[in-house]
């Protein structure tokens, strides 16, 4: 017989999550037409063969790549500001967090730098446990809780 569970303890459980909302993307050009796209490509080429940088950021933070999909190439993720959102960034808010990034052109350049890019495996980028799919709290939580999202 199992020991009784105190009233203040919630036993381990699985919970299905579903999120549905509308994202209002501002007008933006195509990636090849972006004058800063070359910066993205430069970062991509400069780091994809560097074993210290070319690691899934989730696995790297955890020191364990067990949940990572490593049989496919890693993907670069815009960590703080997605490329398609840069035309509507609140420049004052961004400047507070990242001093020196206070004009639309500076935002465009900054979006494609190491400060805003990280490598992720496909699962942690676009998969059901990914930055583009899971809620922010669940995505962040899986950095510290193995097997949180399945």
Image (spheres, grey):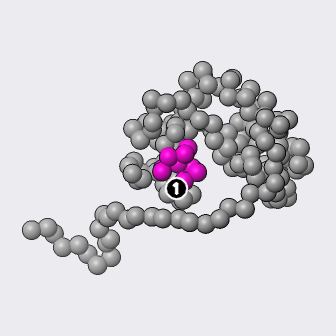
Q: How many marks?
A: 1
The reply to whether residue 145 is visible in this rendering is yes
Residue found at x 48% / y 65%:
18
Which residue extends farthest bottom?
A: 7
Residue farthest to the top, as pictured: 49
The residue at 61%/25% (across/down) is 48
Where does the image place residue 119, in percent across and percent down from the top left? 59, 36
Question: Start and end of the magenta stretch?
Answer: 125-133
**Residue 73 horizontal side relative to residue 43, left or right:** left
Q: Main secondary structure of the magenta part?
A: loop
How dense is the environment of label 1, judged by Cα within 10 Å: few (below 14), some, or many (20 and up)? many
Q: In this view, which residue lies farthest toward the left?
A: 1
Q: Is residue 130 magenta?
A: yes
Q: Residue at x 42, y 53 (%)?
A: 149
Q: Quadrant of the N terminus?
A: bottom left
Q: Above or below — where is 30 with respect to 45?
A: below
Q: Which residue was labeled with disc 1?
A: 134
Q: Secondary structure at mark 1?
A: loop
- Between 5 and 112, which is closer to the camera in this rendering? 112
Across and down, in percent, residue 126 comes to: 55, 45
21 with respect to 35 (left or right): left
The x and y percentages for residue 86 are 79, 50
Residue drawn where x is 38% and y is 65% of the image: 15
Picture quadrant where residue 50 is located = top right
Magenta run includes residue 111: no
Q: Is residue 100 visible?
A: no
Q: Position of residue 61 (x, y in %)?
A: 51, 41
């Amino acid at each position: 017989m199992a020991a009784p569970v105190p009233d203040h303890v919630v036993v381990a459980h699985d919970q299905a999550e579903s999120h549905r909302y509308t994202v209002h993307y501002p007008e933006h050009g195509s990636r090849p037409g972006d004058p800063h796209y070359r910066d993205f490509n430069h970062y991509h080429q400069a780091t994809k063969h560097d074993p210290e940088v070319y690691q899934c950021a989730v696995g790297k933070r955890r020191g364990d790549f067990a949940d990572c999909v490593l049989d496919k190439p890693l993907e670069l993720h815009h960590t703080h500001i997605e490329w398609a959102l840069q035309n509507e960034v609140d420049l004052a808010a961004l400047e507070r967090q990242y001093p020196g990034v206070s004009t639309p052109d500076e935002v465009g350049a900054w979006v494609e730098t190491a400060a805003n890019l990280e490598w992720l495996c496909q699962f942690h980028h676009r998969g059901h446990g990914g930055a583009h799919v899971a809620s922010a709290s669940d995505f962040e939580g899986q950095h510290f809780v193995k097997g949180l999202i399945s």
